[in-house]
Amino acid sequence: MANHKSALKRIRSNNKKRLLNRFQHKTTRNAIKKLRDLTNKKEAEKLFPTVISLIDKLSKRNIIHSNKGSNLKSKLAKHIASL
């Protein structure tokens, strides 16, 4: 257990950040799955910008690596083009 006030505060703030990161990452993963399951091209094109912005936010905040974000965006764009 932590011995200092600042260490206790760090534990609390890390836990809050961890929960927020988990929520944002899970939300983005669900949006990606939803986009991949779509078969209608118009609906997919409508949802695409929101998913891209979610991925960009994750990579900007270092929740995911920037290269992973780029790979995801590329694969989703390829998927939509093939519909």
Image: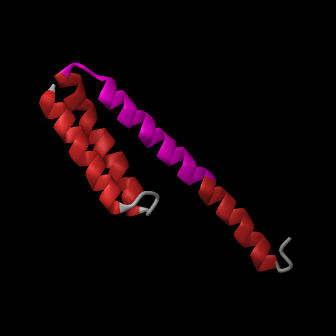
Most common secondary structure along the magenta stretch: helix
Q: Residue furthest left?
A: 81
The region drawn magenta spans 19-40
From the viewer's perspective, is 76 left or right of 34? left
Of residue 29 and residue 50, the one placed in the foreground of this image is 29
**36 inside magenta stretch:** yes
Residue located 73% across and 63% down the image: 12
Give the vertical position of 40 relative to 7 (above or below).
above
Q: Residue furthest top?
A: 40
Residue located 26% across and 47% down the image: 73
Q: Position of residue 41 (x, y in %)?
A: 17, 24
- Location of the C terminus by quadrant is top left
Residue located 44% across and 63% down the image: 62
**71 inside magenta stretch:** no
Q: Position of residue 79 (x, y in %)?
A: 20, 34
Quadrant of the image occupied by residue 61: bottom left
Residue located 60% across and 59% down the image: 17
From the viewer's perspective, is 54 left or right of 46? right
Q: Position of residue 10 (x, y in %)?
A: 71, 71
